[in-house]
Every structure is written in C-alpha cells, then in structure tokens.
C-alpha cells in the first residue's frame, strides 16, 4: 500500500466509472499517525489531509504548515460547539455538520471572523444510534435551514455501517445530494473507496491504506 498505490487505484476506479481522476480529491487521514509517517507523505508532495480531533490537529498542523507550506485540512470527526472557533481557524473544510446548534454557531462565528470553511453535512445513512449525522428523512430540511443561514454548504458526507454493503449507502447519499443541488460527496475509506468512486465520490478519506495501521491508543 502507500500513497502511490492508492493514487493508482483511484485512477483505475475513476476510469472504470467513466470519470476523470482529477474530480476526486484524496484526503489522507493522518489521525493518530506518528509524525514521521505524515512527513513521508508530505515529502511525496501530498497536501490534503483529514483529522478527526481539533486538539490533535492543533498540536500537529501549524508546524507542518510552517515547514511544508499550505496544506488543505478537513475535519472528519465530531465537533463540539466550544471548539468551533478553533476548528474554523485551522480547517479548510468541516465535514461533520450534523445538527442545528452547530450550524447556528458556525453561522455566528462566520460573521465574526469574516470567513467560513467549506461545509459538508454528515448524513447518518444507516440510521445508527451511536453515529452522528442527520437522518436521511431530515436531510432536505436541514440543508434548507443551513442555506437560509448563508452557510457555504459544499457537500455531504457519510460513514456506512460496518456490517452493510457500503454501495447502498453511497448511492443514498448521492441521491440526497442530487435532489438538493449539492455537488460534493465525501465517502469511501480504506476498505471501500473504489466502490465510493463508482457511486460518485468527489472526496475519499483514506487513512490506514496510505500510512499503515494506526498505533492503538
Ligand atoms: C479514520 C477515518 C477514516 C479513515 O479510515 P481508514 O479505514 O484508516 O481509511 C475515514 N473517515 C473517517 C470519518 C474516519 O474517522
């Protein structure tokens, strides 16, 4: 595995789907990875990364950006409202917009700060109790409410249940996006990014297949 291998697999999956590989952004999920592995991927020229905790990203990324220049950072893990300002200052995209309270906080802070990262609504396609995200039946109204607040809604994101066929969840996310005129789809991880590309993913979030297994915490 590794970055080159994943890029090749993305190219092939795009070709099979009749899509241009350039439409697909590879988010290298660096959460919990040792610095030297992240540096190796930065040294290969990659500049798009995902982190799931604001604090961990704050500890790592300012120094990486100092050394390597601009890096596009995506927040892909739950966001508490008391960390929203820090997240807006650090991240280029927040993929975990999953409730009205957070939308209101982001809208207020966007006014104060004068800018807002790209936002993705997380949809709980499997309707799992333990998972964050808007339920599919509530997605259309939630998206309208976010738009009424002038939030820069760019995409939808989902994490399918581990024991179900992911393609069905990717297809559902694509349908919700299409009927709401939303262009970006963040879906697919190490085990299923090729299937996600077949279903229209514009962002795949790949961690262990690039960096190796995360050291257990
Ligand atoms: C950790 C994580 C990933 C990457 O998972 P891998 O299986 O290591 O590719 C992708 N998306 C989210 C939301 C994650 O938390």
Image (tube, rainbow, N blue to C red):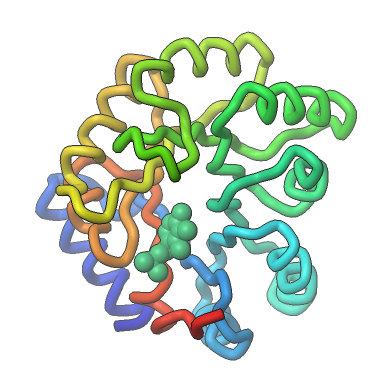
Query: In this view of the protein, which residue sits in the foreground, 10 or 29?
Result: 29
Q: Is residue 23 visible?
A: no
Above-or-below relation of 35 to 137:
below
Above-or-below relation of 45 to 16:
below
Q: Could you tell me which residue is drawn at 27 percent across and 58 percent down? A: 193
Q: Give the side of residue 140 with respect to residue 73, left or right.
A: left
Q: Quadrant of the N terminus?
A: bottom left
- Indicate the position of residue 114 as horizontal and vertical percent values: 84, 30
Query: In this view of the protein, which residue sits in the foreground, 38 or 96?
Result: 96
Ligand 1 quadrant in view: bottom left
Q: Quadrant of the C terminus?
A: bottom right
- Indicate the position of residue 143 as horizontal and vertical percent values: 50, 17
- The residue at the far front in this view is 129
Q: Could you tell me which residue is drawn at 21 percent across and 34 percent down? A: 171
- Indicate the position of residue 68 as horizontal and vertical percent values: 69, 75
Q: Could you tell me which residue is drawn at 75 percent across and 79 percent down? A: 67
Q: Could you tell me which residue is drawn at 81 percent across and 49 percent down? A: 86
Residue 153 found in image quarter = top right
Residue 191 found in image quarter = bottom left
């Amino acid at each position: 595995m590794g970055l080159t291998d994943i890029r090749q697999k993305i190219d092939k999956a795009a070709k099979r789907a009749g899509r241009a590989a350039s439409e697909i952004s590879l988010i290298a999920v660096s959460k919990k990875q040792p610095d030297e592995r992240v540096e190796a991927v930065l040294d290969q020229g990659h500049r798009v990364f995902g982190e799931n905790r604001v604090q961990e990203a704050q500890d790592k990324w300012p120094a990486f950006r100092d050394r390597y220049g601009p890096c596009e950072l995506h927040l892909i893990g739950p966001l508490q409202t008391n960390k929203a300002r820090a997240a807006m200052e650090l991240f280029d995209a927040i993929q975990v917009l999953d409730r009205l309270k957070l939308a209101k906080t982001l809208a207020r802070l966007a006014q104060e700060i004068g800018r807002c990262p790209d936002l993705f609504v997380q949809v709980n396609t499997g309707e799992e109790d333990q998972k964050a995200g808007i339920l599919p039946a509530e997605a259309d109204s939630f998206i309208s409410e976010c738009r009424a607040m002038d939030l820069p809604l760019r995409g939808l994101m989902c994490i399918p249940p581990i024991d179900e066929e992911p393609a069905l969840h990717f297809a559902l996310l694509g349908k919700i996006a299409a009927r709401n005129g939303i262009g970006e789809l963040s879906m697919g991880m190490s085990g299923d990014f090729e299937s996600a590309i077949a279903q229209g993913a514009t962002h795949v979030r790949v961690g262990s297949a690039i960096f190796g297994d995360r050291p257990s915490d």
